Image (tube, rainbow, N blue to C red):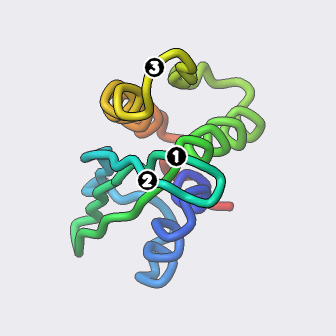
Amino acid sequence: ALFLACFGCLGRHMEAEGVSGCTPAFSVSVVGASTRKGPRGVYTVYFLAARDGRGEWTVERRYSQFRDLHGALTQKFPQLALPKFPSKSLLKSASQRATERVQSLEDFLQGLLLFYDVSLHVM
């Protein structure tokens, strides 16, 4: 599914399991965040927990990957009023941004799952 494929591992997991789209039992949540140091500075990863009725798994994603997902879905579904994407706050510390974004990214994902075309779309 496009929704899952944009998140790499989630999509590969579903494809490996033979699932061509989200099932009614599918759920995904942003369950936390961690600030890390890398060669280019500090960055944050967000932990997503997913469940499809047959199993559970967790993946890490960065804010930019959520932004890319929003962009891909906006292009694929221009007719839909997709949920507002959380803005990038530059004036706060990385840990403050992470804490606030966990809830806003969770709201964004849950809003996406409300759209039948988005959650069940197969590329």
At 52% from the left edge and 75% from the top edge, which residue is drawn? 12
Looking at the image, is 21 positioned above or below residue 17? above
The reply to whether dot 2 and dot 3 touch (C-beta < 8 Å) is no
Looking at the rendered structure, the kind of residue marked 1 is Val
- Taking the spot 70% from the left edge, 37% from the top edge, the residue there is 71
Q: Which mark is residue 42?
A: 1
Q: List x then y, in percent, for residue 4.
A: 52, 58
Q: Which residue is mark 3?
A: 92
- Callout 1: 10 Å neighbours few (<14), some, many (20+)? few
> What element does badge 3 sit on?
loop
Q: Tell me which residue sits at (34%, 53%) in the image.
A: 47
- The x and y percentages for residue 34 are 34, 49
Mark 3 closeness class: few <14, some 14–19, many ≥20 residues within 10 Å: few
Q: Residues within 10 Å of mark 2 (few under 14, many from 20)?
A: few
- Kindly check if marks 2 and 1 are in contact, taking CB atoms under 8 A apart as contact: yes
Q: Nearer the viewer, residue 18 or 86?
A: 86
Foreground residue, 39 or 60? 39
Q: Is residue 23 visible?
A: yes
Tell me if I can see residue 114 in this picture.
no
Residue wearing tag 2: 36
- Give, as a three-letter code, the residue at label 2: Arg
